[in-house]
Amino acid sequence: MTELAWIENALTSSRPQAMGALLRYFRDLDRAEEAFQEACLRALKNWPIKGPPRDPTAWLIFVGRNAALDGVRRDSRSTALPSEDRISDLDDVEADMAERLDDAHYRDDILRLMFVCCHPDLPATQQVALALRIVSGLSVREIASAFLVGEKAMEQRITRAKRRVAEANVPFAAPNAVERSERLGSVAAMIYLVFNEGYSATSGAEVVRSSLCDEAIRLARLLLRLFPSEPEIMGLLALMLLQHARSAARTDADGNAVLLDDQDRTLWNRTGIEEGLALVDKALRHGRPGPYQVQAAIAALHARARTPVETDWEEIDLLYQMLESQTPSPVITLNRSVAVSKIRGPEAALRLITPLAERLSGYFYYHGVRGAYLGEIGRAEEAREAFDRAIALARTPAEAAHIRQHLDRLAMKTQTD
């Protein structure tokens, strides 16, 4: 690893803890962020010369806090700014800070930081943008690029989120047990939103944006370190690992989407799959299956099947029924219909989703799935109408191209018949 690479890794891994501590000190997102950025600049100047500190996080907190305090004094013009030598010549002073920052303290700081980003007053889009900026440290340009919006628009979105947090007078005290329980679900949902935006991009030409998937997985690992015995967090991480393990096989050489049954399973990431399977098994042993665990169990059944015909669709159908009872949703029923079609045929699947027509009338996947079932039972004209509707609702060129493939297959089948 190059010198610059290890420094970058240290800064990235230290960011949530350092930002959380600085937020506790200053109770201001902008000031905490500026303090951390200043500490990073000084790390880039000092670490290559003096070597890595014993505890990079403690070093960054110490330097960031002092730099921010110097800024406050300078702005107030009540105290002269200390000399650069005094600020930069830190020796091993961070060791004292490290001794005062135990794991429990770090835990509260990170939770506070995540809870602030997931404040209920913020819309989901602002929660995700704020978390990617504050917790993950992505630049405004990177976040804007990931969501395919203008940099100025994304900067305004993040600024509005910060303003809402300030106006809401969000408490910065360490979260108590009740608050942790109440807000943990919001944090997990925010992380999964980040993952889904990468896994099924809602705009642009790309089917998958791996950088967002990777960042969501990193955040989930962080959350699991804070809650190592929480089965739903295990399930969340397992679900994302198992889904992301298929990424290399989800598109062909032309960038077109490849359905699960058509994927080259030798391209699946076995390391990610094995880790995900182990987490699923560990989570389910707690005997408290929640929605993330159930979804992970479904993904695990797909991952364990060496070929499409070996997939245990009966078990997948049962798991979807459990998921329907936990979190009733027409989208879950639509997903379950795929298992039903494999077990009892496309007509049964079509009957299952027909009552969903009104609620999912504007949902791309509903019309695509319905068109596929109609095509399988020979109702070609209705299938074409469903596919046309799906294309009209497609959010990305890749989604539209995928449906056109179905139309081409339908035309070939019609000619053959």
Image (cartoon, rainbow, N blue to C red):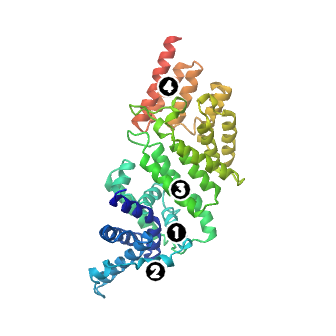
Q: Are dots 3 and 4 in contact, CB under 8 Å?
A: no
Image-based side of 355 in relation to 191, left or right? right
For the point 48% across and 51% down, the residue is 194
Note whether 354 is above or below 280 in the view shown: above
Of 92 and 345, nearer the camera is 92
Instruction: State how far apart marks 2 and 4 are (Cα).
Output: 70 Å
User: Please, what secondary structure does the residue beneath circle 1 have?
Assistant: helix
Q: Residues within 10 Å of mark 2 (few under 14, many from 20)?
A: few
What residue type is disc 3 on? Answer: Ala
Instruction: State how far apart marks 3 and 4 are (Cα).
Output: 41 Å
What residue type is disc 2 on? Answer: Asp
Q: Earlier in the sequence, mark 3 or mark 1?
A: 1
Q: Residues within 10 Å of mark 3 (few under 14, many from 20)?
A: many
User: Please, what secondary structure does the residue beneath circle 3 have?
Assistant: helix
Of the residues tagged 2 and 4, which is closer to the observer?
2
Pointer 3 residue? 220
User: Please, what secondary structure does the residue beneath circle 2 have?
Assistant: helix
> Which numbered marker is on residue 250?
none
> Which numbered marker is on residue 112?
1
For the point 45% across and 30% down, the residue is 402
Q: Earlier in the sequence, mark 2 or mark 4?
A: 2
Q: Position of residue 136 (x, y in %)?
A: 43, 59
Pointer 2 residue? 96
